[in-house]
Amino acid sequence: MARANLPPLPPHLLSTEAPTRYRVAWPRLVRLLVPTVLRQPLQLAWLGVLTAPVARLHRELVAYLFQKRRELSYNSQVMLFERALNDRFDPLLQRIRIRNADTEFAITYWNFRAEQQPDDDFLRNRSEMPPFGYYLRNRAEYAGQSDFTVVAPEYLQPKAVEIHELIRRLKLATKQYTLIFQN
């Protein structure tokens, strides 16, 4: 069985802080299981060395257990969905947001389409003008095919595949989404 890349055990999950059913004081257990006649310091040290790998595996198992319980607590509710994305990809700043697209956006122009001219405050050549004026939202949001939009910071763009995988795992089967990277 391949060993998963587990993060180090957080301080609040060390053996003294873990729930009672997972708490094992390995040196004490070894001392109590050895008959009184054989409780010599050298014997206890040798048994402590032998149980060290088991204690390490136990710590990793407890860490894995808490990690999986945390992952199983996530679902498609927006609050938990955002928490899952932020915990995995932006844990410090929590900037990943989910916007519902229940209503269709009406495209808002800063200039009327018929005018095709800049404001008086600044002048531009016609070649510098965008073909359809200025938009307040991303073109993908107007497609009307998505039920919600995930807005992530731009620096997460190299992790887009992982973000898509997590979104597909947590979203409802019939929902469509759009992933947008912004500053």
Image (cartoon, grey):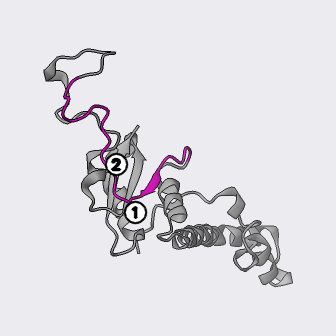
Q: Earlier in the sequence, mark 1 or mark 2?
A: 1
Image quarter where the N terminus lies is bottom left
Residue 100 included in the magenta stretch of the image: yes
Discs 1/2, front: 1
Q: Residue 66's spot in the image, x, y percent?
A: 60, 69
Q: Residue at x 81, y 68 (%)?
A: 41
Q: Residue at x 14, y 21 (%)?
A: 126
Q: Is residue 59 left or right of residue 132?
A: right
How many marks overall? 2
Callouts 1 and 2 close, C-beta under 8 Å:
no
Three-letter amino acid code at the position of disc 2: Ile
Of 23 and 105, the residue lying toward us: 105
- Residue 34 visible in the displayed image: no
CA gap between label 1 and label 2 equals 17 Å
Density class for disc 1 (Cα within 10 Å; few <14, some 14-19, many ≥20) is: few
Density class for disc 2 (Cα within 10 Å; few <14, some 14-19, many ≥20) is: some
Of 151 and 50, the residue lying toward us: 151
Q: Is residue 83 left or right of residue 19?
A: left
Residue 94 included in the magenta stretch of the image: yes
Task: Provide the residue span drawn in magenta.
Answer: 92-117
- Residue 169 visible in the displayed image: yes
